[in-house]
């Protein structure tokens, strides 16, 4: 131990059971700079071993486009570690997912002495008691060998994340975030380590026209991974509809990335949705709710699509704070059933059926007539009200919980006095067939969690579909908007899209015509 240094011994335990917990932490000096413990020489990660302190240098080679990010987080893989630290005053931030209250605590290190921090993380809720499990549906982390699977599993454990859909993709023609294997032994995942499932997936892209889509639960890569001039293949084929079919052929689920809003203004999301090819729309990401542009409108056209959250590049370290690696920052909770152990295939099936909610912090539990997201409720012509139940819990105070019907807020429960739990039951008018969902709003200010940007809290339940008198959900305004959008796309694609094989172009425009007919049929008297 050199002059001017001491030691820090940290233990982090569950507030109730007192068991040691894998966690993520950040050590901050008074002037705002970070202290990251030395990583040491122990680079072994396998079924039975990981270094007690996990830092960025253990996995920087896995970060592809994010390899230069200045990540300042540290993971305690076993919940306990001792390491050297300069003498002085510090603040420690300790975090483990969305279901425990983070710890912020000051401490002092003296020269030549060991400072002991014994910290207890208290639970906000335990979603697993009711069979809800969280996963990140949009992750890019290179996996070159078996060691990398265990590194990622340790990172997930520190953030209380049950599963990741870890996706290969292409950037300017180069394969990024390669996945050494996609699945094994007829499974949709590669590694099930303790409570963490590492699964390989794919983000299929066309930056020129169509957008980005997500394939989860696949056991082999769908080639060519990307199409279009920017991404390494001139002809924009195969179509996203083909890729959705091939994903389903492998038993996987297919969805649209970034809510159809962040990549191009010419995304074909409403086409694949109308063709029945999509299972979900990624609508919580990048500190935002993205569902207004397409997800709401597609639900208003009678389509049933799940909502998901995914963090995308989870190691950029520039979204909220340098120590927020963003892995699982936007996540998808799926209900597998009470007293049910986690199973990745069941998780994917829950997404397919819409039994989920998306969140970047709050947890939202929502029912209509006792039935949760993804359910269909049949109401008689004579019924004029419907029973609603909602409960939101969060590690930080929430502003409000809103009930949304066919895209409009019809009821609000305010989080007066900085509530961390908002729960209510009520009956609401039922004038027509509708989809209903609950969403949460809030705002966490930077000083609360040692950050550089406000954290805009979002959570959104999946939809419950209520059919009154057997009639479908329909907003004529949104059906008109989607029909006009498909007409616009068709004309644009005719002018600017070139195919090597004319049959491929014919297939595209046949899909466009079928989608247009879907929306136009909704508008018929």
Image (tube, grey):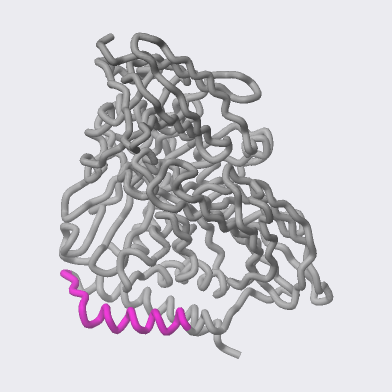
In this view, which residue lies farthest toward the right? 382
Residue 196 image position (x, y, % from top left) = 47, 31
Left or right, 475 with respect to 42, comes to: right
Predominant SS along the magenta part: helix
Q: Residue 329 occupies which quadrant of the picture? A: top left
Q: Is residue 231 magenta?
A: no
Any part of residue 494 in sight = yes
In the image, residue 427 sits, relative to residue 317, either above or below, namely below
The segment highlighted magenta reads 481-500
Q: Position of residue 93 (x, y in %)?
A: 45, 33
From the viewer's perspective, tell me whether residue 458 is left or right of residue 142: right
Q: How many marks?
A: 0
User: Closer to the camera, 221 or 406?
Assistant: 406
Q: Is residue 219 visible?
A: no
- Residue 492 on the magenta segment: yes
Q: Is residue 476 above or below residue 429?
A: below
Residue 203 in the figure: left or right of residue 495: right
Quadrant where the image shows the N terminus: top left
Judge whether 167 appears above or below 1 on screen.
Answer: below
> In x, y percent, where is residue 390?
70, 54
- Left or right: 324 in relation to 316: right
- Quarter holding the C terminus is bottom right
In the rendered image, the residue lying farthest to the bottom is 525
Q: Where is residue 245 in the image (x, y as percent from the top left)?
A: 40, 58
Kindly identify the residue that appears in the image at 38 percent across and 67 percent down.
261
Residue under the point 20% across and 47% down: 175
Q: Which of 331 and 94 is in front in this view?
A: 94
Please tell me which residue is depicted at 64% across the width and 36% down the height of the picture.
126
Q: Give whichever of 39, 226 is nearer the camera.
A: 39
Q: Note whether 48 is above or below 472 in the view shown.
A: above
């Amino acid at each position: 131990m050199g002059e001017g240094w001491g030691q820090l011994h940290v233990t982090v335990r569950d507030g109730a059971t007192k068991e040691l917990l894998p966690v993520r932490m950040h050590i901050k000096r008074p002037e705002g700079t970070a202290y990251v413990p030395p990583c040491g020489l122990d680079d072994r990660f396998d079924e039975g071993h990981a270094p007690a302190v996990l830092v960025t240098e253990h996995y920087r080679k896995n970060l592809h486009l994010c390899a230069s990010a200045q990540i300042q987080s540290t993971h305690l893989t076993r919940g306990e570690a001792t390491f050297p630290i300069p003498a002085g005053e510090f603040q420690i931030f300790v975090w483990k997912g969305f279901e425990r209250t983070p710890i912020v605590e000051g401490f002092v290190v003296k020269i030549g002495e060991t400072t002991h921090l014994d910290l207890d993380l208290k639970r906000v809720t335990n979603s697993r008691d009711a069979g809800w499990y969280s996963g990140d549906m949009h992750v890019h982390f290179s996996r070159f060998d078996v060691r990398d699977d265990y590194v990622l599993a340790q990172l997930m454990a520190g953030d209380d994340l049950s599963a990741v859909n870890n996706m290969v993709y292409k950037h300017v023609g180069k394969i990024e975030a390669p996945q050494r294997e996609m699945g094994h032994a007829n499974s949709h995942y590669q590694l099930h380590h303790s409570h963490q499932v590492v699964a390989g997936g794919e983000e299929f892209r066309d930056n020129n026209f169509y957008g980005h889509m997500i394939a989860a639960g696949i056991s082999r890569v769908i080639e060519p991974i990307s199409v279009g001039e920017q991404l390494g293949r001139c002809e924009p084929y195969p179509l996203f509809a083909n890729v959705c079919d091939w994903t389903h052929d492998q038993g996987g689920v297919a969805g649209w990335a970034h809510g159809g809003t962040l990549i191009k203004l010419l995304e074909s999301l409403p086409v694949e949705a109308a063709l029945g090819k999509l299972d979900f729309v990624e609508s919580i990401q990048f500190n935002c709710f993205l569902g207004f542009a397409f997800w709401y409108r597609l639900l208003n056209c009678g389509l049933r699509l799940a909502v998901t959250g995914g963090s995308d590049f989870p190691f950029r370290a520039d979204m909220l704070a340098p120590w927020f690696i963003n892995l699982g920052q936007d996540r998808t909770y799926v209900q597998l059933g009470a007293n049910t152990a986690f199973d990745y295939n069941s998780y994917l099936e829950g997404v397919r059926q819409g039994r989920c909610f998306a969140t970047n912090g709050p947890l939202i539990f929502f029912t209509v007539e006792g039935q949760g997201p993804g359910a269909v409720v049949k109401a008689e012509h004579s019924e004029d009200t419907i029973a609603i139940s909602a409960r939101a819990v969060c590690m930080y105070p929430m502003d409000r919980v809103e009930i949304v019907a066919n895209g409009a807020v019809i009821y609000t429960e305010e989080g007066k006095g900085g509530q961390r739990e908002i729960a209510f039951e009520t009956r609401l008018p039922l004038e027509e067939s509708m989809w209903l969902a609950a969403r949460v709003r809030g705002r966490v200010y930077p000083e609360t969690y040692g950050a550089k940007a406000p954290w805009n809290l979002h959570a959104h339940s999946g939809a419950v579909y209520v059919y009154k008198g057997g009639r479908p959900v329909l907003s004529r305004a949104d059906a008109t908007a989607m029909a006009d959008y498909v007409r616009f796309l068709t004309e644009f694609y005719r002018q600017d899209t070139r195919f090597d094989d004319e049959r491929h172009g014919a297939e595209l425009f046949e899909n466009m015509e079928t989608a247009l007919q879907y929306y136009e049929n909704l508008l018929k008297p």
